[in-house]
Image (cartoon, rainbow, N blue to C red):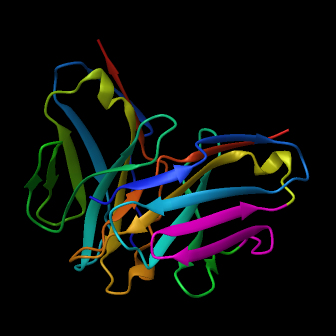
Amino acid sequence: GAVVSQHPSRVICKSGTSVKIECRSLDFQATTMFWYRQFPKQSLMLMATSNEGSKATYEQGVEKDKFLINHASLTLSTLTVTSAHPEDSSFYICSVISGGSYNEQFFGPGTRLTVL
Amino acid sequence: DAKTTQPTSMDCAEGRAANLPCNHSTISGNEYVYWYRQIHSQGPQYIIHGLKNNETNEMASLIITEDRKSSTLILPHATLRDTAVYYCIVRVVRVKAAGNKLTFGGGTRVLVKP
């Protein structure tokens, strides 16, 4: 399957600052990537669909101005959490669609964000 | 995509087969059954998927009932490294990539014990 990396794996920041998380597809060109968020002891929740060359599509209830997504190339999507607050502390996971017959989805290792 | 129901948690003995059930009674004819697992503090990992027939790969076997309203994921020889949350997801495979987003339920928290 596709190999997906995320950077950083862990980040701690102060309230009010912005944090950028990178998602890279290392061996596959992905026109579509997804961003999920996972709070402790909860399941993954889809935040947005990242589309190369166009605007991201956000799920209901996700603020597009707070969670900025830029799909700069076929191998890189970035999620910027702007003016982060403690309630944004979460595990952020990206995934890529591999194409092929089943449009399989492969996930990155995740980024743990802690906002103090 | 159809909803799935899984037990919240289950314990398994190391070295024994682990059978993880999933109910998807409202599954439609073109929906596939997918299984992913998530080891603590990692991203989900694809395990296996199937439509009607039973499937097997190097990780697990998937048994789908004839009416397709339920399925069972079988880990043939559970190891301590198989401790994870296992998600059963039903979805239609869509041609447009963006249409293939996944909806995760609560999953089954599997603890493999020595």
Question: In the picture shown, does residue B20 fall above or below A38?
Answer: above
Labels in figure, total: 0
How far from the left and from the top, in percent, is residue B108?
40, 41
Determine if the magenta segment contains residue A70. yes
| Quadrant in which residue B71 is drawn | bottom left
Residue at figure coordinates x 66%, y 64% from the top left: A79
Question: In the picture shown, does residue A85 fall above or below B29?
Answer: above
How far from the left and from the top, in percent, is residue B109?
42, 35
User: Residue at the top extreme?
Assistant: B114
| Quadrant in which residue A114 is drawn | top right
How far from the left and from the top, in percent, is residue A7?
57, 50
* Viewer-closest of A51 and A22: A22
How far from the left and from the top, in percent, is residue B45?
35, 48
Would you say residue B26 is visible in this rendering?
no
| Left or right, B102 with reference to A110 | left
* Viewer-closest of A22 and B85: A22
Range of residues picked out in magenta: A61-82
* Viewer-closest of A26 and A32: A26
Residue at figure coordinates x 39%, y 81% from the top left: B97
| Left or right, A58 with reference to A50 | right
- Image quarter where the C terminus of chain B lies is top left
Residue at figure coordinates x 37%, y 73% from the top left: A29
* Viewer-closest of A94 and B110: A94
User: Residue at the right extreme?
Assistant: A16
- Image quarter where the N terminus of chain B lies is bottom left
Would you say residue B30 is visible in this rendering?
yes
Determine if the magenta segment contains residue A74. yes
| Left or right, A72 with reference to A85 | left
